Image (cartoon, rainbow, N blue to C red):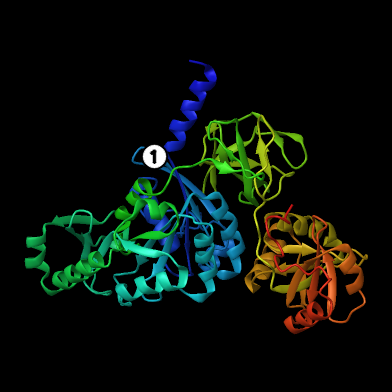
Amino acid sequence: MSTITLDGERVALQAARRRTFAIISHPDAGKTTLTEKFLLYAGAVAEAGAVKTREGGRRARSDWMALEQQRGISITSTVLQFAYRGHVVNLLDTPGHRDFSEDTYRVLAAADAAVMVLDVAKGIEAQTLKLFEVCRARRLPVITFLNKCDRPGRDPLELLDEIEAQIGLRPTPVTWPVGIPGDFRGVIDRRSGQFVRFARTTRGATAAEEQILDRAQASIEEGVAWHQASEEVALLQAVGADLELESFLQGETSPLFVGSALTNFGVRHLLDAVIDLAPPPAPRFDAAGVRRPLEAPFSGFVFKVQANMNPAHRDHVAFVRVCSGRFERGMTLTHASSGRPFSTKHAAGLFGSERDTIEEAYPGDIVGLVNASDVRIGDTLFEHGAVSFPAIPTFAPELFATTRAREADRYKQFRRGLSQLEREGVVQVLQDPEGDPTPTLAAVGQMQFEVFTYRMEHEFGAVVDLSPTPYTVARRTDVATARELRDRRGVKVLARHDNSLLALFESEYMLRRLESDHPEFCLDQLLFDSSTAR
């Protein structure tokens, strides 16, 4: 048997052991808590919440940025790799706030599945509906977790209807609660028909004890709560809301689990589902629409760039999703967009802000390339046989502000920070091609501006001022149309780093009027579609 065949078999076997998924939710749904509990159940931490800072406080491993710890919210995505049941799990934790939905969208491009966390009291909230819709549009397999069942909330049957109506995913409950929200006793596992009763642990710091009861015993001990849950399970069966693996993998149905991340109720069921139901890495389509086999030589794409994860070293890391082949530290790759060789001497495995040198990685894994200053989000790296993966689309900006350094002698730091944060996708940086040097920042939400100003001051030593602009909507345009727009009031044409031109308008009405009067103008509503991105 040839070496190529042996290597191919090794890659295929290793890829089959990988599970790479993202956790998405609206703010305060319990996503970060659930992430910590996954680590607890996998044995990656000995006690949930026991990650100490130097000051002796506690923080989540996934929320490593100082501003995240101050605000108590996730601002940037992180990667956590750990072992569970003989598999390698790559967990991609994402920001929950709508203002950082663009970062979440980039992470979804690197994931093979998603876990959607919903607060049982709130259901689907409008501010993050777009992210759930993205999963549906990409036909990404989604597992749903109804969280906080230990607190008062809505009728779970009502939430099933809401999920299907608003997202278009048909939920198929695998576990079902015994006891109403706020009086959560345990779950019926619909696969076995057994009742799993949970016992609380101190602060949820250790795995919840589980007691398995048969139906007769559960009926005696749980009484009314058991009979009501049993009737609901019978109703689910009658309407055909049963687990369907094929339709789940096609992104049409969503296996649903219930529990409480805070108390660890149902966490094991959910983590087991990631292993048993979520798909392993599969061949990915390249930019030409051809699937690249897993056994092909190494290839991967950059979905995230992050600076100052280690403030002591002021470095930055490119997050690369491995798509094919075997990665070996020190191998020389080709940077697809430039054609230049790329060294991988400084390669690391990622666990939140922590990283360790790794020697190899396989499809589905996330490799951190330290000080990879020449790469951008969406870039492809490959070993042999030129390949390029589709660019990662970004959301159209909705807010615009000009920025400048408050102190003239900090201009060098200002330019360095501006370049780095634009490369990371914290904000989009637009310039006037006619010569005005004042940069304009474009963002999806206001908190992106807050992160920008905070990081500019604390990481790059440049205090900045932001001035809002009157513009509210943008469209991609071309050189000919830009020439016609330059002298019009209420319109401004700016350029991105890739020289694509954007026309900014003060109102949607002004844009619609111009489109009506000049249908020949290029004002593309698909502003940052993958076909137009770099």
Residue 163, x across and y down, in percent: 41, 70
Look at the picture and state if 348 lies above or below 49. Answer: above
Quadrant in which residue 444 is drawn: bottom right
Instruction: Single out the residue that lies furthest toward the top.
Output: 1
Nearest the viewer among 230 and 437 is: 230
Look at the picture and state if 209 lies above or below 185. Answer: above
Q: Residue at x 38, y 65 (%)?
A: 170
Residue 273, x across and y down, in percent: 34, 51
Nearest the viewer among 218 and 132 is: 132
Q: Is residue 54 left or right of residue 289?
A: left
Q: How many numbered marks, from 0 up?
A: 1
Residue 455, x across and y down, in percent: 68, 62
Under circle 1, the secondary element is strand
Look at the picture and state if 371 lies above or below 458. Answer: above
Q: Which residue is drawn at 42% across and 51% down?
A: 249
Q: Residue at x 34, y 69 (%)?
A: 148
Read off the residue under disc 1: 87
Say whether residue 223 is visible: yes
Say whether residue 437 is visible: no
Quadrant in which residue 447 is drawn: bottom right
Amino acid at the residue labelled 1: His
- Label 1: how many residues lie within 10 Å, few (<14), some (14-19) or many (20+)? some
Q: In this view, does 13 lie to the left or right of 380?
A: left
Residue 238, x across and y down, in percent: 23, 67
Q: Which residue is drawn at 39% across and 62% down?
A: 144
